[in-house]
Amino acid sequence: MENPNYPLNVWYAAAWDVEVKRSLLPRTICNKPVVLYRKQDGTPVALADACWHRLLPLSMGELHGDNVICGYHGLEFDDTGRCVYMPSQDTINPSACVKSYPIVERHRFIWVWMGDPALADPALVPDLHWNKDPEWASDGKYIHAKCDYRLVVDNLMDLTHETYVHGSSIGNRAVAEAPFECTHTDKTATVTRWMLDIDAPPFWRGQLGKPGNVDRWQIINFEAPSTIAIDVGVAPTGTGAPQGDRSQGVNGMVLNTMTPETDKTCHYFWAFARNYKIDEQARTHNLREGVYAIFGEDEIILEAQQKAIDANPDHVIYNLNIDAGSMWARRLIDRMIAEETAMRSAAE
Amino acid sequence: MSDIRAVADDVRRIAFAVEGSLPRFDPGSHTNVRVEIGGQAANRTYTVVPSAPSEIAVAVKLHPQSRGGSRYMWGLEPGQPVRLTVPENRFELSFRTDHYLLLAGGIGITPIYGMAKALTARNCSLRVVYAARTRGLMAFTDELTELLGDRLVLRDNSVGEHIDLAAEFANLPPDAECYLCGPIGMLEAAKAAWAAAGRSTSRLRYEVFGDSGLFAEEAFTVDVLNRDISVSVRPDQTLLEALTSAGVQMIFDCQRGECGLCAVKVVETSATIDHRDVFLSAEEKSHGDRLCACVSRLAGGRALIDVGYRPD
């Protein structure tokens, strides 16, 4: 069997917190159908979305207390996937189980672990704390992206594309012209770009609300395999932002985490967090919708790119200097997949 | 086959070096081994036990009434090629609690050993209680002692030691889980004690091999209602095998006494039914009017059974 293009022993965002309710939500994650719901006490549950008996998706059944009842023959499974009722018999077949996946609710997302449950340590949930931090105002949306999740990683690891894809909002020549620095650790990669003494693009001019040239920063923080927190902002030139004093500027965090759905589609969860004017709910709303419109421009590009890749399966991809960040990201992803493959073959 | 060694008086650990890479498998998994019995190929299911990487190991008890499976396994020579399936799991650990009680009886230690290893690695609160008829029949005691220290308790029936189920269950926190693998009598007792302790049925997990009853295997005879057939069942044969060999059409599936598809009605009998399944409830078993043909049998004697056949 060909190796998958994603690691399994990681936490993947399965849904926004508000998507998972007292009802059955089907979602495919890493090519596996999963059903998500909340128990009566609010804690989330993730079960394999296929009845043990005849494989009907459990999401077509109904929630009964903390249990799921299959919509075909009424087999009932508890929140750990164990069958607790079988029709027309007094006992329950001890083999009757559906897989239950480790699950954690954090940073306003529901995270699931599709790999070895013994390794599912909640401390490994990617850091997106800005999404639920009293010092920040944040909100975001979900995009069903019709591409390999790694194409979204590529997109976010190099923001040169802003100049061409998002020219009317956040892009300008400066992004494509400014030099950048790329660093990495064993699990992270960082691309830092400072654009000094430039004319602010329309979006940032509006957020700053001040005239004059600005120093603009974009610090892209990648955490393998698919979480990217981008520290962005502008401050009036000469107020010391490059030296560390951002007090005169405005600062946002673009939070992104992608979850493989299939080999060629993914769930893309994003949010925009800011640490200025955080009590302005209308601003939160408008920023979310504004970013959604901007990301809609990326969606078109990514879907078209996936189609082109599919149409040219043997094509060798060329890389540019600007691709250092995405190449480091892919190196770290490949390393995780290789380690898992080695672990599987050495499994005891 | 790469290695064979005795791990108890009647148990041998048999390891297989695997060609190519192995997918990950969890404790409690089993593999189906192609064995040869009297020149005929058959499949036998064995739980996998902890082993070196790129190896699959099983522990095989030599059954006195072996139909030939365990005898074949014991007779394997190093280097001999053997076909076995990629391990699968139907007795999975949940990892949903921090407190585990593992109970093993006899050869039932095989899945419990792997589970103890996985739970130790995870630093869960853990207690393993292992009972057998004699100390010599306990397998992997050195490995388990090293792994568990005083979290391992051995109960040697021959010196009057038994598992005090009520006390074991009373000491557990409410969210604890119990995993049991052992003979049917031990399971029935544990189920009753678990229910008496007011604990959730889904937190008692078990596997039985369907090969142990309250009586030794004896030959018995059944007459099939509406068919002019009498079937003699040898001690080394199941009722289901004997019926199908005699041309009686049967529906069956798991062959482990779990699904209930092969259950037949007992119309009349003078003999005692040796229930070895987990499909019928204790109450249903006490009625003595049904039995699961794949694993359960008569303790000798004769019965008239109804397999559902109705003449036109």
Image (cartoon, coloured by chain):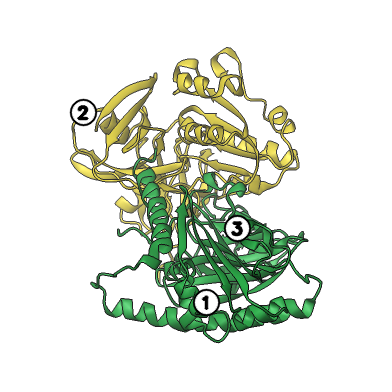
Chain colours: A green, B yellow
Question: Could you say whether the residue bearing mark 3 is in a helix, strand or loop?
Answer: loop
Image position of A133 with respect to B53: above or below:
below
Question: Could you say whether the residue bearing mark 2 is in a helix, strand or loop?
Answer: loop
- Looking at the image, which residue sits at the far top? B159
Horizontally, residue A47 falls left or right of residue A238, namely left
Q: Position of residue A184 (x, y in %)?
A: 46, 52
Q: Position of residue B14 (x, y in %)?
A: 31, 30
Give a yes or no on whether discs 1 and 2 share a subunit.
no
Q: CA distance from mark 1 to mark 2?
A: 55 Å
Q: Earlier in the sequence, mark 1 or mark 3?
A: 3
Chain under disc 2: B
**Mark number displayed over residue A144:** 1
Horizontally, residue B32 falls left or right of residue B281, namely left
For the residue marked with disc 3, what is the amino acid? Gln
**Mark number displayed over residue B78:** 2
Quadrant of res B237: top left
Question: Could you say whether the residue bearing mark 1 is in a helix, strand or loop?
Answer: strand
- Looking at the image, which residue sits at the far bottom? A168
Give a yes or no on whether discs 1 and 3 share a subunit.
yes
